[in-house]
C-alpha cells in the first residue's frame, strides 16, 4: 500500500534556511489566496518566493508538503491566540475569548482560512499537522471540562461539535465577505451556548 502522507523534508537549521522556508510558505499562502488550488504549483511558489525550484524541493518535496507546512503555521498562530482564553476565571468568559480569537484569526485571511480548512480535512496528516491538531483539541477539552460549561455529552464530543460550529459559521461568514468581527463572534457564541444548553 502506498503511503500518501507528505514525506519528511529537510529541516532548516541556519537562519538563512529558515528565512527561505518562511518565504516559501508565505508565497504558497499568497498564491492560494489569489488563485486558489488551481493556480497552486511548486513552480509558482518557487517563482513567487524568488528561489530556485531545487531549493524548494530541498524542504518541500510536493505541493502537499507545502500545504501541510502552511496548515501547521496557521494552526500555531491560532493556538497562541486561543491559549489565552484559558487564563479567564470562568468557562463562559473563556468561551467568549476563544470564539473571538477564532473569529479574528479566520477573518484575518478568510479565503486562505477556508481553503486550509478544506485541505486539512482531506490531506493525510503528518507528524506536525497531527501535533498541532491535538494541541488545539486539548485547549477545547480544557475549556469544556470547566464546571460552568458542562453538557450531558462527554467533553471530547462537545469539543468536536463546538469546534465544528465555530469553524462552519466563521467560514460561511468569510465567504459572504463579512468583516465585523464583534457581530459574528456574538452570533457564534449564541449558537454555541444554545448547543451547550440543549445537549
Image: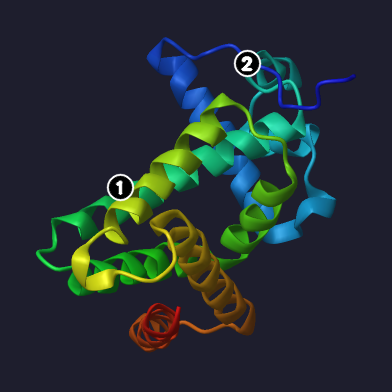
Please tell me which residue lies in front, 183 or 63.
Answer: 183
Q: Position of residue 121 (x, y in %)?
A: 68, 50
The answer to whether residue 161 is above or below residue 197 is: above
Per the rendering, the mark at residue 182 is none
Q: Secondary structure at mark 1?
A: helix
Tell me if residue 15 can be seen.
yes
Answer left or right for 123 relative to 190. Answer: right
Q: Please state, as top left, top right, bottom left or bottom right, where the C terminus lies in the image.
A: bottom left
Q: How many numbered callouts?
A: 2
| Residue where numbered disc 1 is placed | 80
Res 100 → quadrant: bottom left
Crowd tier of the residue under label 1, counting other residues whose Cα lies within 10 Å: few below 14, some 14–19, many 20 or above: few
* Lower sequence index among marks 2 and 1: 2
The answer to whether residue 34 is above or below residue 186 is: above
Query: What residue is rendered at 64% in x and 16% in y?
Result: 8
| Residue where numbered disc 2 is placed | 9
Q: Position of residue 46 (x, y in %)?
A: 70, 31
Q: Secondary structure at mark 2?
A: loop
Amino acid at each position: 500500500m502506498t503511503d500518501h502522507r507528505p514525506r519528511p523534508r529537510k529541516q532548516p537549521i541556519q537562519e538563512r534556511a529558515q528565512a527561505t522556508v518562511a518565504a516559501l510558505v508565505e508565497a504558497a499562502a499568497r498564491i492560494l489566496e489569489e488563485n486558489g488550488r488551481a493556480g497552486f504549483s511548486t513552480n509558482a511558489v518557487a517563482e513567487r518566493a524568488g528561489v530556485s525550484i531545487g531549493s524548494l524541493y530541498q524542504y518541500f518535496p510536493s505541493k502537499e508538503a507545502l500545504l501541510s507546512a502552511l496548515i501547521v503555521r496557521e494552526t500555531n498562530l491560532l493556538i497562541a491566540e486561543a491559549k489565552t482564553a484559558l487564563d479567564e476565571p470562568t468557562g463562559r468568559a473563556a468561551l467568549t475569548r476563544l470564539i473571538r480569537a477564532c473569529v479574528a484569526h479566520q477573518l484575518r485571511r478568510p479565503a486562505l482560512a477556508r481553503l486550509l480548512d478544506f485541505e486539512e480535512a482531506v490531506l493525510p496528516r503528518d507528524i506536525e499537522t497531527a501535533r498541532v491538531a491535538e494541541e488545539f483539541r486539548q485547549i477545547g477539552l480544557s475549556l469544556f471540562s470547566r464546571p460552568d460549561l458542562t453538557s450531558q455529552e462527554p467533553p471530547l464530543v462537545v469539543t468536536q461539535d463546538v469546534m465544528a460550529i465555530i469553524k462552519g459559521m466563521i467560514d460561511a461568514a468569510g465567504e459572504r465577505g463579512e468583516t465585523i468581527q464583534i457581530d459574528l463572534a456574538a452570533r457564534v457564541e449564541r449558537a454555541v451556548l444554545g448547543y451547550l444548553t440543549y445537549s
